[in-house]
Image (tube, rainbow, N blue to C red):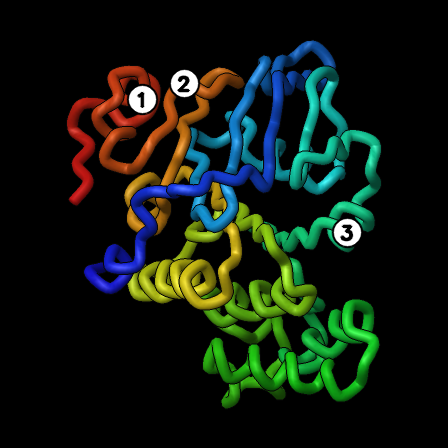
Amino acid sequence: MGIIKKFRIKSFKNKKSILSLKNISLSFKKRQILENISFDINEGEIFGMLGPNGVGKSTIFNLITGLIKPDDGQIFINNEEVNEYPIYLRTSKFKIGYVPQYGGYFYDLTLLENLNAVAEVLVDDHRKRAEKINYLVSKFELNQITDIKARFLSGGQKKKLVIAMALLGEPELLLLDECFAALDVMTIKMLQQIIVNLQFENKITICICDHQARDLLTCVDVAMVLSDGKVIAKGSPSELVKNQNAKLAYFGDSFKFN
């Protein structure tokens, strides 16, 4: 874990918001999912969203990508309101990459075929396409499994593949939905290191949502806790675990970090 903490950015002297949600509310039928939530993600941050299952974390990702629209409020990407922008325009114009909790790949295609399928859509130049794929295969140490069908890969290998597919579009903002779910301890450590390296080496802003508090707090710079459709606390990992509202709603008194 020491390697991960070594590269954590602890402060942002020149704060520049890459994503802002302002007074967002959303209901499904009569159930209030999100109620007047506001938060910013600054350029270069690794930002975390914590909360129990069903609290609205994945819903926020769906709002950011444009899969659903809020009942009220505004979404800004690079200071431009995007409420009416369709999914494809948000991903292409603002370079948003998304890694879903489940799937995200073609089950019956090999790892290399999956990368090629996405690259053919995102990268016009044939030579550049091959260079990008070779770079990502090498970066994520996937060289030995390029000819294996995706459905036969391990959980960690599938996560690497889907992240690599998302990176083909050279995203400036990468969304990771429940990325630590159902993974073993060593695979989680590997994924945490990948996330920090993407920030440190590729200068990508990353937003992670998860309900595994300790795993998420290990690799983020800033996090917030959601409860009952509201943001009840936000801060650095050390600030968050000391926050009384966060303790009452999510962590409890016995939670230890570091």
Label 3 near label 1: C-beta < 8 Å?
no
Query: Do residues under tags 2 and 1 come within 8 Å of each other at their CB atoms?
Result: yes
- The residue to which callout 2 is attached is 232
Q: Position of residue 248 (x, y in %)?
A: 28, 16
In this rendered view, identify the residue nearer to me: 209 or 22: 22
Residue, far top: 30
Q: Residues within 10 Å of mark 3 (few under 14, many from 20)?
A: few
Sequence-earlier tag: 1 or 3: 3
Task: Determine the image quadrant of residue 224.
Answer: top left
Identify the residue at image location x=38%, y=27%: 234
Position of 234 with respect to 69 (left or right) is left
The amino acid sitting under disc 2 is Ile
The number of numbered badges drawn on the structure is 3
- Marks 1 and 3 sit apart, C-alpha to C-alpha, by 36 Å
* Residue assigned mark 1: 246
Q: Amino acid under label 3?
A: Lys
| Quarter occupied by the C terminus | top left
User: Which mark, residue 93?
Assistant: 3
Residue 194 placement, left or right of 134: left
Mark 2 or mark 3: name the one nearer the start of the chain: 3
In the rendered structure, the answer to whether residue 193 lies left or right of residue 242 reads right
